[in-house]
Image (cartoon, rainbow, N blue to C red):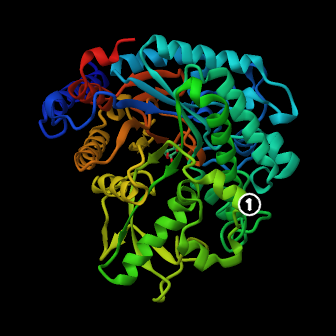
Amino acid sequence: MELSHLYHALLALEMCFSVIMVLCNPVSLKGNLDSSPFPSSFLFGTASSSYQFEGAYLSDGKGLNNWDLFTHKPGNIVDGSNGDVAVDQYHRYLEDLNLMNYIGVNSYRFSISWARILPQGRFGSVNKAGINHYNKLINTLLLRGIKPFVTLTHYDIPQELENRYGAWLSPEVREDFKYYADICFKHFGDRVKYWVTFNEPNVAVIRGYRSGLYPPSRCSSSFGNCSSGDSENEPFVAAHNIILSHAAAVDIYRTKYQKQQRGSIGIVMNAIWYEPISNSYEDKQAAERAQSFYMNWFLDPIILGKYPLEMQEILGSDLPVFSNHDQKKLKSGLDFIGVNHYTSFYIRDCMFSVCEHGPGSSKTEGFALRTALKDGIFIGKSTAVDWLYVYPQGMDKIVTYIKKRYNNIPMFITENGFGENDKSDSPTEESLNDLNRVEYISGYLDTLAAALRKGADVRGYFLWSLLDNFEWTSGYTIRFGLHHVDYATLERTPRASAIWYKQFIANHTSPQEFSA
Ligand code: BGC
């Protein structure tokens, strides 16, 4: 036997052995059906987004979106790649549904490409081929016993809106979003029972208008390297328009569709757990402020009708104001909160003490410095992803925090997952043997279970992600998949984590719950 064959055979053996170890490990798969904290209606799924998965960027009448333009500009994506093909789920969804059925998920979170439905926003006609595509996907999912959990926009918007009026910076965008949402409810709402208006608008505005790292690449010179923008003002204007766009879509859903269609609608936030770096009153207050300037920024107006008090006090007239009419529309403006939780950070106060310049320390971020280090030790194991530290307790803490602040409104964990560096130079088997990912997921699910046992109304969990995919500005250099994707052939291969998740789901659900 050649040496390289022997090496591959040994790796394959090691992978089998690891999977057996993983499946036999009583801690990682702890719990059986009788003691499972996950109710029988609980959704177990995987999550994805149109730009990161679909590819087919010019197929069947799709219009160009902001990410098409952004990725095609040299220098924006670390490996010079783009989502033109991505993992080609537009054409390969049947194959991907087989993978989902194999794992045994009962739900799939995906997003609709706005520019595939409305290539020119409300300034052009509806693209029938786009409607047909999502009809096929939704119908097949349902036939396979998988509930569609649909996001209207996951960072991607028709470029037309950017060109015409600066997209989120203009109140005009609310009309566009309302128009688009109405079309989606009308065409798909008889079968889609879970709607998300926005994926992580906090990340979209911070990266789009404060650091300028995402389109439309706007920022002030002290915050990043952009040709124009105003990092201290524009994120708040864009957020305000997003919040009111969300409210407009919810209003349409509630008044025109919800009664007959009987679905629910929510928003998905990126949710980081912020741990005070010390027990001091100042650091504890700073951790609260960090949450307000990141997640509550959107959730407070939508649920409570006003911006968090800390934001009002610190930002004063820089924070846009809601009219009485807006406030009425906003209150209780969702049926569930989508929580994308991956990581945690320490927070140090910068309001009462002087601290070094860094992420979170500015006025626009609430004078709350974010750091992963305390006394030279990381909050959790560091990973290939610069913002991802493994801190499983954060899941319980963030869920319990949201439960308290918003009176236990139903929640879904709409994303949680583990990224690794692309190791194209090493044999694929190495990447298939992803025990770090298994350890991560199992730890986070354990503490999620603890939060449920304490009464948190969490109704579903979606892993990011079914497949490796286009990881925004990191391109294809970071892999988040339960399945490895060979980007030359687009072949999908299950990792140990896919097998682990399959077993976890089987242990926490009864088989009949998954029949079509
Ligand atoms: C985003 C995904 C992204 C994932 C991993 C989430 O914040 O919604 O689009 O791929 O994190 O970075």
Query: Is residue 238 visible in the rendered structure shown here?
Result: no
Q: Residue at x 83, y 40 (%)?
A: 160
Q: Residue furthest bottom?
A: 353
| Quarter of the image where one finds residue 465 | top left
Crowding near the residue tagged with mark 1, few <14, some 14–19, many ≥20 C-alpha atoms within 10 Å: many
Residue 365 position, x and y percent, is 56, 71
Element type at mark 1 = loop
57 with respect to 353 (left or right)? right
In the displayed structure, would residue 476 be above or below residue 74?
above
Q: Quadrant of residue 389?
A: bottom left
Q: Which residue is rendered at x = 58% and y = 72% of the image?
A: 311
The image shows residue 291, relative to residue 10, as above or below, that is below
Q: Is residue 332 visible?
A: yes
How far across and down, in percent of the image, does residue 347 sit?
41, 72
User: Does 403 appear above or below 465?
Assistant: below
Residue indicated by mark 1:
218
Quarter containing the N terminus: top left
**Label 1 sits on what residue type?**
Arg
Q: With 136 as the anchor, is 341 left or right in this view?
A: left
Whether residue 431 is situated above or below residue 216 in the rendered picture: above
**Looking at the image, which is closer to me, 134 or 326?**
326
Of 152 and 40, which appears nearest the observer? Answer: 40
